[in-house]
Image (cartoon, helix red, strand yellow):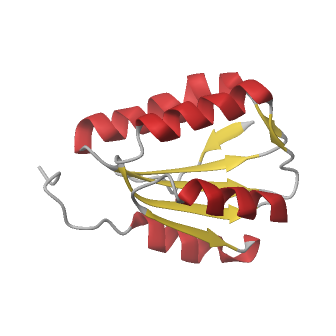
Amino acid sequence: MIEIMPESTERMLAVKVTGTLTDEDYTATWIPALEAIIEKFEVANALLYMDESFQGWDMKALWDDAKFGIRHRNDFQKIAVVGGPTWVKWGVRLGEMLMDCEVRVFEPGALSEALRWCSETIACDCDK
């Protein structure tokens, strides 16, 4: 399940994920919210907070994530991943090589720090 966090800002989508992420989580929440930010500002920041119940992605959601990431690889300034099992951290490091933005992994107790870092925007031509 994916839930938009109240700490989200105009340019940063912060979400809390629990259990197993599904195709519906991506198509109904994650992708439309990020595309709205990208459409308005040309770039977005994203924070993914995985609580202790997070188990991973189903296959369709994993495919959705890969397609979206490749299609929008140049449309992010910062991506923060907070918490999650060790295997997620390795996956983030591999995915980071495909993204043209800053990517940071934070320990579960560093959510406030991650929110602060991710909500800071970098000056760009997208400021309208």
**Residue 98 pos. (x, y %):** 50, 52
Q: Quadrant of residue 113?
A: bottom right
Can I make out residue 85 in this image?
no
Residue at image location 58% in from the left, 23% down from the top: 28
Q: Quadrant of residue 102?
A: bottom left
* Count of numbered marks: 0
Q: Is residue 58 left or right of residue 75?
A: right
Residue at image location 48% in from the left, 39% down from the top: 70
The answer to whether 84 is drawn above or below residue 5 in the figure is: below
**Residue 81 pos. (x, y %):** 63, 61
Quadrant of image for the N terminus: top right
The answer to whether 60 is drawn above or below residue 16 in the figure is: above
Residue at image location 15% in from the left, 54% down from the top: 127
The answer to whether 122 is drawn above or below residue 5 in the figure is: below
Give 15 or 102, whichever is nearer the viewer: 102
Give 96 or 14, whichever is nearer the viewer: 96
Can I make out residue 15 in this image?
yes
Q: Is residue 84 left or right of residue 111?
A: right
**Residue 7 pos. (x, y %):** 51, 57
**Residue 77 pos. (x, y %):** 36, 59
The answer to whether 2 is drawn above or below residue 44 in the figure is: above
Residue at image location 85% in from the left, 41% down from the top: 19
